[in-house]
Amino acid sequence: MKWHTYRYRHVRGFSIALRYSYTGLSSPFIQSDSLASCCIYPTIRLYNPSKSPPISPITHSINPCISSSKISNFLTYHCFLRYLLIAGNMKVTVTTRSGRELINGGLVLDSSATVADLQEAIHQRIKKYYPSRQRLTLPLQPGSKEKAVVLQSKKSLKEYTNGNSDTLTVVFKDLGPQVSYRTLFFFEYLGPLILYPVFYYFPVYQIFGYKGERVIHPVQTYALYYWCFHYFKRIMETFFVHRFSHATSPLSNVFRNCAYYWTFGCYIAYYVNHPHYTPVSDLQMKIGFGFGSVMQVANLYCHIILRNLRNPSGNGGYQIPKGFLFNIVTCANYTTEIYQWLGFNIATQTVAGYIFLVVAASIMTNWALAKHRRLRRLFDGKEGRPKYPRRWVILPPFL
C-alpha cells in the first residue's frame, strides 16, 4: 500500500490536506491492464498553516472504496479527489475593479459561508488585506449606471448568487489602512483639550511679540472650563456611550479631522485668551454659558438615546429616533451641538469662534439633511413599514 498527499485550497482560514492510499498499483502513473481493481482510501485533514505542528486535532476521514477494471494515470485520482473536496462548496472568484483576478483560481468556501468568511479567506491569502480594509461588491454590467451592491459581512454568500449556489464573482476594493472610530475620535478631541489650556496658562503671547503683563478676565477662565468640559465629555462619550455602525475609518481621516479640530482649537484659544481681549458684560456671559451648558447636558442625553437604538454590535439597522428632542427634530444631537457652541460664542464673542460655529453648522447640516432623506425613504409607510413623522431637520425653527 502506497500513500500520497494531495493538498488543496485554503478554506475559511484552513488548508485542506487529503492523504490517500491505493492498492494494486506500484505508482499512480503506471498503467496496468493486468490488475482487476484498485481501491482508494482518502483521509481529509484540516490544518492551520500558522500553527506548528500544522495538523490540528480535527480530522475527518471517509473510506469509500473505488473499484474499476482500469485506472490509467494520475488524472483519474486527481479528478476524484478534487470532486471530494469541492462537493457541497462554493467557488468564489475575486476580481479587482479593472477586471484582474485578485486570487488566481479563486477561493473555495463552504456553501454556508458568510461574507465575513470570504473576507477572512482573502486575508489569509493576502495578509495586508485584513477584513476591515476590504470592500466587496457584486459586479455591474458594462456601461451600467446603477450603484454596486455592497456585500454585508453577516449575510450568507448564497444570498448574492442569484439562484446559482455553486459560483460567485465579487469585486474587491482596497479601502486602505484603517483605524477604529474610537481611535479617530480620541485623537481629534484630545488635541483641543490639550492645546486650549496652553494659551491660558503659558506665556505663549510673548512669542508673538507681546511683552506686557497679561490680565486674566473671569470670562476667560469660565471659557476654559466650558471648553475643557466639552472635549472631555466627547472623549468619555467615545469610549462609554457611542456605538458605531462602522467598525473602522480610513487612516487618512485621522490627519484630516485632527487638522480641523486642532487648528480651530488654537485659532479660538488665541483670541479668547489674548491679552487685548475685551470681555462681554456679566449678563451676556451668564446667558451664554448658561444656555450652552444646558445644551451640553441635552447633547449627552441625545447621545444616550441614540446609543439605545443600536444593539451592542452596532449593527441594529435604522430605527426612527424617539423621545426628548427627537420627537420634533430628526438630528437633535446636531441641534444641541450647534446651540452649545452658539452659547459659547455669545459668552466670549470672538470672530474666530463664530467662524468655527458657521463651518461646524454647515457640516452638520449636510449630515442632517442626508440622514433625514434616508429615514424618510426607509420609513415611507408602504408595505407595512412605518411612516416617518413630520419633523424639523436640525435647526428649529429655521430648518
Image (cartoon, rainbow, N blue to C red):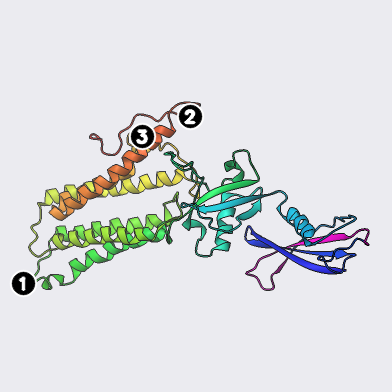
Q: Which segment did they paint magenta?
A: 34-57
User: Which residue is at the front of the view, 349 or 390?
Assistant: 390
Q: Can residue 22 be seen in this view?
A: yes
Q: Which amino acid does label 3 sit on?
A: Asn
Which residue bears the numbered disc 2? 385
Task: Name the side, left or right, on which 222 lies relative to 301.
Answer: left
Q: Name the residue under label 1.
A: 212
Q: Is residue 162 left or right of residue 236?
A: right
Q: Residue 327 carries which label?
A: 3
- How far is mark 3 from mark 2, CA to CA? 19 Å
Left or right: 128 as drawn, with respect to 283:
right
Identify the element where label 1 is drawn. loop
Q: Which amino acid does label 2 sit on?
A: Arg
- Residue projecting furthest to the left: 212
Residue at 46% of width from left, 51% of height from top? 97
Q: Position of residue 399 (x, y in %)?
A: 25, 35
